[in-house]
Image: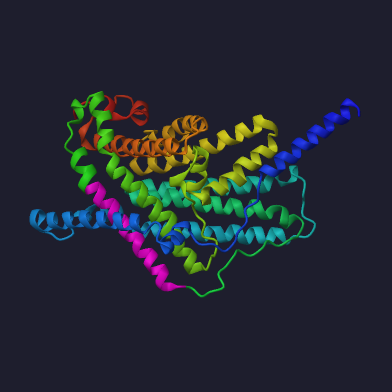
Amino acid sequence: MSSSQSSDRRSSEERVKLQRVFKEKTFIARESLLTTEFRNGNMQIIYNGFAAVFILFFLRALISDIFVHGVPLHHTWLIWWNFRDFIPTMLVWSAMFASTFLVYSAFKLWAHVPAKTVKISEQIPLLAVYLSYLTAFFYFPLKFLFAMELNCACSFIITCETTRIAMKMHSFIRENWSKAVIRKTSADPVKNSKKRDLKAAGYYFLECLLNIEFVNLAFTQWAFPILHVQDYPSLTVSNIFLSLFTGIVPGIICLVCLFYGLLHCWLNCFSELLQFADRQFYHNWWNSSNMAEYYRNWNLVVHDWLYAYVFRDLSAVLPGKKGLKIAQTAVFFLSAAFHEYWFGIAFRTFYPVMFILYFIFGGIFFSVSRLISSRSAWNTALWFNLLIGTGMFIAFYGQEWYARRGHCAPYSSQILDALLPRHWACQRV
């Protein structure tokens, strides 16, 4: 066999190996992991423990509301403040959602045009229109957000929903573009054969509301009493970093409520209403054996999207190990950038805690975790990382929130004031 033939054979084998890596998403009828675990009784004791903590927090708040403030449910002021502009926010969300039907209708018309162009160079105008739509889709809701001065929760609704809808729209066009060119139809989503269980959907929705109250209790009883009494102009480096540890308890409660309320209850609620059968939105991230497994299992919905439309597509354009590294870095960067975008807009500050946690620390931990052979040691390191990360989020964002609301004067330069946290060098107002 000649050397050229051997080289061709090796390159062919390498291509086969790469093809085996890129798996297609398969939708099948399956329940969420916690639903199965609750039925088996394996996770019920943990659920009961969190329920007991919630009841104790609520009783403490209720007693304080009645005997100190003289108003029942006084502590819910934070919820009302957050959702003050909920109705106009949902009107804008409805307009965002309605605009996707225009994209669907336009795409459907284009898909049925006979003898449509298939050359990439001739599809550039269509790509320009699509990118212009995405730009407008992000810009106008963001303009509304700042014009209405939306508070944190409504800001999250706008920024997270623009991201979610844009992801779904891109996946629809990406998956159906080639099918439209060759005039194929896509398969219908997996649906339940059983009827909708409105009682189950209502129970999931109720749990979503209780999770919002749990986060409210964690902030009003743990975070605010510490953060709002600090003397910000006198904060030292040690004060800033020691506050990290006081943020761990409310931080981990928020993390668990975010996971259970959003990835389990909210998604299962709408899956029940829409009769969508594949409910594997997450896997057992709490028992991961390495960082890659944790990132993959925490949010399978986002992970599958990033894998299919960022990692796999970039790897196809940039073949080889270098291409895989670039694609992997792009996934980490996009995830970190959008997390920072959501939180930065909601808190009206550029304080890249989320970006550093996800992109820098997450990347380092991702590499180091592969060197940890003991599953127990890795799992301890995982929870240590989560606890410190949530503590940093509560403490640093919380301090900057108060610093920018009457406690610290702005920097002399508007650029510096936009880029640097005020509580680092707080000057008395």
How many numbered discs sit on the rendered protein?
A: 0
Q: Nearer the viewer, residue 7 or 94?
A: 7
For the point 59% across and 57% down, which residue is it? 103
Is 378 on the left or on the right of 211, as rendered? right
Which segment is the magenta one? Answer: 197-220
Q: Nearer the viewer, residue 375 or 171?
A: 375
Looking at the rendering, in which quadrant would you find the C terminus? top left
Residue 186 is inside the magenta segment: no
Q: Main secondary structure of the magenta part?
A: helix
For the point 46% across and 52% down, which residue is it? 161
Looking at the rendering, in which quadrant would you find the N terminus? top right
Residue 210 is inside the magenta segment: yes
Residue at the outermost bottom position:
195
For the point 65% across and 58% down, which residue is it? 107
User: Residue 283, position in %: x, y?
Assistant: 49, 51
User: Residue 362, position in %: x, y?
Assistant: 46, 34
Looking at the image, can residue 84 be seen?
no
Please determine whether, in this image, residue 417 is positioned above or below residue 345: above
Q: Nearer the viewer, residue 97 or 18?
A: 18
Residue at the outermost right position:
1
Is 118 on the left or on the right of 108, as rendered? right
Looking at the image, can residue 422 be seen?
yes
Is 104 on the left or on the right of 358, as rendered? right
Type of colouring: rainbow
Please determine whether, in this image, residue 116 is positioned above or below residue 39: above
